[in-house]
Image (cartoon, helix red, strand yellow):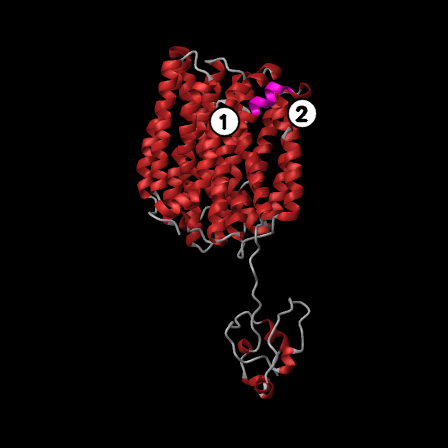
Amino acid sequence: MSDTRAQTTTPEAPATTLAAPATATATVPDARTPAVRTAPATPEATATPATTRPASQQQPAPTVLPPVLTPLGLLTVLLGAALPLIDFFIVNVALPTIDHDLHAGPAMLEMVVAGYGVAYATLLVLGGRLGDMIGRRRLFLWGLSTFGLTSLACGLAPDAGTLVAARVAQGAAAALLLPQVLATIQATTTGKRRAKAVSLYGGTAGVSSAVGQVLGGLLVSVDLAGTGWRAVFLVNVPIAAAAWLLAARTVPETRSPHPTRVDGLGTALLATTLITLLLPLTEGRAAGWPVWSWILLAVFPFAGTAFVLVERRAERAGRTPLVPPSLLRIPSVNSGLTMIVPFSLGFGGFMFVVAVALQNGLHYGPFAAGLSLAPLCVTFFLASLAGPRLVLRFGRRVVIAGSLIQGTGLIALALSVYAGWPGLSVAGLAPSMAVLGLGQGMVLPVLLRIVLSELPVAQAGVGGGVMVTTQQSGLALGVATLGTLFLALLPTVGVRDALLTALLSQLAIVVGTTALALRLPRALR
């Protein structure tokens, strides 16, 4: 005797089945499954015994529609993405005030920046994996809550040590929050809607970096209720609360259809690899290059090699590693990530160096230093909006053109600094900043879309985590390398020449990224 319940829920039923279910089967609903609308039974079908038809022809399988991200839901997740990115840069213009109020010193000031960046980069892939496992909306809400609380702790910190500890915790909260954004977009959008959403994410990622310094300068200058630098952290609290309320109502829950356990050994080795590279490079110069910084740098290649070997072995054994090597063999992922590293390195170094040079060399106040980046913000965002249409027509040539425009902007900025120093005004910087932002806005959003274009939906969380980790690590490396070069040259050549050296170094990086763009797919899917 056949099992009626099994017949009504068999998932393999073809959509083109002509025979209707037998009468007994069609009239016995299963309370545990959603009701399925079926056609009335025909006389021929009614006269046919139920046992003469396979179960797959008796009941069409219900069509389960994927969750859809509404425009308000997209705005909400983009707001959540902006918070961690803004906070990486928002402290740049506030560092002199923090030093004055907390007597922090150079080494502690570097840790205010590095502590956040290292924790953020180290835990991003793990945050993506956890979202795949227990739900991306849930992790997004947890990330918003903890980010708001840790921002409050930063704003209320009584001393430099407490501020550094709170910044590390804030970076960890950001690592829970940010990977869920791209994974949610991947799982809830398709076609043109996905292309537009990814481009908006790319625009958000770039603009947030510049907006962070503009907003930071404004908040420090206004000195709301005497809060001074504390306002750059306290402003996150109401924004995170508003984003949480919106997300609870507008962001659909998604998770990987085949969630896997956390790769504990891989997570530990990735954390060791990133810490042994980023921490000494960002903190070593300010601390006078102590012995521990050289020891960590010596450990880095061994930790990195061990991570690669462990991940390969895990995948060969049929397990799911933290960063599946097969993911990096996807052409779009490999070529896109290879270009994201130098682009982010140059961008992160540029934002740090400009913030210091304008305040220390041209004696701009925090607000003027931030305002000088406003033209870059505007053109970056406009270029990111045009990106989806341009890339459909021109493919990877958009990235090549964007790199050339970015290089042109750097040359124009270097000439402005050389000719106009020390009387260079905010208006005098505006044309070169606008060209620079236009080029960068044509590159980053398209690169992010390329990386995600061939990524399986089941790996949306880990793929997004790997991509953002690459981007974040590049930003931190930029601060460490170009920032260290700039600060090391200051005592001997002065601010102007140190800035010119940093700009020309970034120009060399742009030349390299232009060559790497030739490895990108010619057209996007």
Q: Can residue 298 be seen in this view?
A: no
Query: Secondary structure beneath disc 1?
Result: helix
For marks 2 and 1, give the CA distance. Answer: 29 Å
Residue sitting at the far bottom: 47
Q: Can residue 142 be seen in this view?
A: yes
Residue under numbered circle 1: 374
Residue under numbered circle 2: 156
* Disc 2: CA contacts within 10 A as few (<14), some (14-19) or many (>=20): some
* Rendered location of residue 180, percent (x, y): 55, 45
- In magenta stretch: residue 98: no
In the foreground, 279 or 464: 464
The stretch of residues the image draws in magenta is 216-223
- In magenta stretch: residue 217: yes
Q: Quick check: 460 left or right of 140?
A: left
Task: Report the magenta stretch's main SS.
Answer: helix
Q: Quick check: 154 left or right of 463?
A: right
- Identify which amino acid the numbered label 1 is placed on: Ala
* Rendered location of residue 400, percent (x, y): 33, 38
- Identify which amino acid the numbered label 2 is placed on: Leu
* Disc 1: CA contacts within 10 A as few (<14), some (14-19) or many (>=20): many
State yes or no: discs 2 and 1 in contact (Cβ < 8 Å). no
* Rendered location of residue 220, percent (x, y): 60, 20
